[in-house]
Image (cartoon, grey):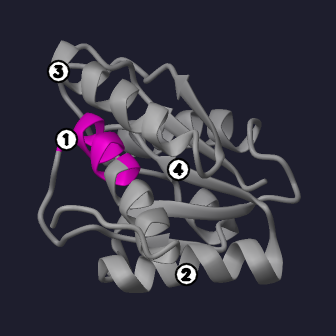
Amino acid sequence: MLHITIICVGKLKEQYLKDGIKEYSKRLSKYCSLNILELPDEKLPESLNENIINKIKMTESNNILSHIKPDNYVFCLDLNGKQYSSEEFSKKIENVALNKNSNITFIIGGTLGLSNELLNKSNELISFSKMTFPHQLIRLFLLEQLFRAFKIQFNEKYHH
C-alpha cells in the first residue's frame, strides 16, 4: 500500500479547514495510508530582516528534515516548483509509487517558506499556482488533489 506523509509547519486554527481535511483524509483512506504531521512554527518577531528570516526558515526546515525517512520520495510545495494539471499529477503519483517508492512525503513550509537546503534535498518541487495562498489552505488543496489523482488513476467518477 502507498504511504503518504504530509509534513506541515503550523497548527490549523479554522474549524472549516479542519473539517475539510478530516473529510478528505477519510476519502483518501480507501487509496493510501495517510499521515499528517503538524510541526510547530517559529514565532515571528515584530521586525524581520534577512538574517532572522533565514534563521527561522533553517529552524523549521531542520525540524522537518528530522522527520523525513531516508527512503521517502519527497515533494516540497514551493512557488517556484513545477505546476501539474490534475491528470499529470495523478500520473506522477502513480509513476513514483510504481517505479520509485511506496513512501511519499509532501512538505508544506511555514509562513516564510523552506530553507534552500531542504528544497535542494527534496526529489521535486511542485506548485499549485503562482498565486500566494495561506499555507493552511494549501493543506486542503493538497488533500483534494491527491484524492482527485487517485480517482483519475482508478478511472472513477469525480465531479469537476
Callouts 3 and 4 close, C-beta under 8 Å: no
Q: CA distance from mark 1 to mark 3?
A: 14 Å
Q: Which residue is mark 4?
A: 107
Q: Is residue 83 left or right of residue 59?
A: left
Q: Which residue is mark 1?
A: 134
Q: Is residue 95 left or right of residue 91?
A: right
Q: Which residue is mark 3?
A: 16
Give the SS element for disc 2: helix
Residue 109 appears anywhere in the view: yes
Q: Is residue 124 above or below residue 49?
A: below
Q: Is residue 135 magenta?
A: yes
Callouts 1 and 3 close, C-beta under 8 Å: no
Q: Amino acid at mark 4?
A: Ile
Magenta span: predominant SS is helix
Name the one closer to the observer, 51 or 65. 65
Question: Residue 97 location, x and y as percent?
Answer: 72, 71
Q: Is residue 58 above or below residue 18?
A: below
Foreground tag (1 vs 3): 3
Q: Amino acid at mark 3?
A: Tyr
Q: Which residues are magenta?
A: 134-143
Q: CA distance from mark 1 to mark 2?
A: 25 Å
Q: Residues within 10 Å of mark 3 (few under 14, many from 20)?
A: few
Q: Is residue 151 magenta?
A: no
Give the SS element for disc 3: helix
Q: Residues within 10 Å of mark 4 (few under 14, many from 20)?
A: many
Foreground tag (3 vs 4): 3
Q: Which residue is mark 2?
A: 92
